[in-house]
Amino acid sequence: MKRLFLTIFILLLAACANRPSDGNIERQVNERLLREGGSLYIVENFRKTNGFEPGQNVYVAEVEYDLVFQKSLADLALNLRDSKDPLLAGLDLVELGIKYGQFQAGERRHRTEKVTFHKTEQGWLLQNDR
């Protein structure tokens, strides 16, 4: 019986941890990256490397991951003429070129970044200020 209470107590402490879980960090960062890139790339080798609390209810995680491009910038440019709004698609292409430079299909880019989470009534949420 004491073991059961001890196990429950440990689980409650873990649930009330003052930081988001590594799995929660990975899920929310992946969701943001996929919203930003659509089917342009996939995310591989995600890892949280460090983290700290700069203040109450705020957690900053240092993460690294690889972006693996599924199409090249040149392929995307070739598809511009098939777009319903070539001007808007062209602006999107310019933005991708500025953000990632020239990239090829299958190219892997290693990225590192710091992401900030805020503790809310709904749990830890990623701050989207990119």
Image: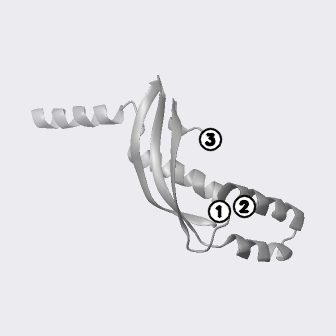
**Viewer-proximal residue among 6 and 55:** 55
Q: Residue at x 60, y 74 (%)?
A: 105
Residue 38's mark? 1
Looking at the picture, the colour scheme in use is one colour
Q: Earlier in the sequence, mark 2 or mark 1?
A: 1
**Residue to which mark 2 is pinned:** 97
Q: Earlier in the sequence, mark 2 or mark 3?
A: 2
Of tags 2 and 1, the one toward the viewer is: 2
Instruction: Provide the secondary structure element on which disc 3 rests.
Output: loop
Locate residue 6, reporting x and y percent. 17, 33
* Residue 46 position by quadrant: bottom left
Q: Residue at x 64, y 73 (%)?
A: 71
**Residue to which mark 3 is pinned:** 128
Instruction: Provide the secondary structure element on which disc 1 rests.
Output: loop
Instruction: Provide the secondary structure element on which disc 2 rests.
Output: helix
Is residue 93 rendered to the left or right of residue 3?
A: right
Q: Earlier in the sequence, mark 3 or mark 1?
A: 1
Locate residue 42, reporting x and y percent. 54, 65
Q: Is residue 29 above or below residue 127?
A: below
Residue 128 visible: yes
Q: Residue at x 78, y 76 (%)?
A: 79
Measured Cα–Cα span from mark 3 to mark 1? 17 Å
* Residue 36 position by quadrant: bottom right
Q: Residue at x 42, y 32 (%)?
A: 52
Measured Cα–Cα span from mark 2 to mark 3? 22 Å
Locate residue 100, reporting x and y percent. 65, 59
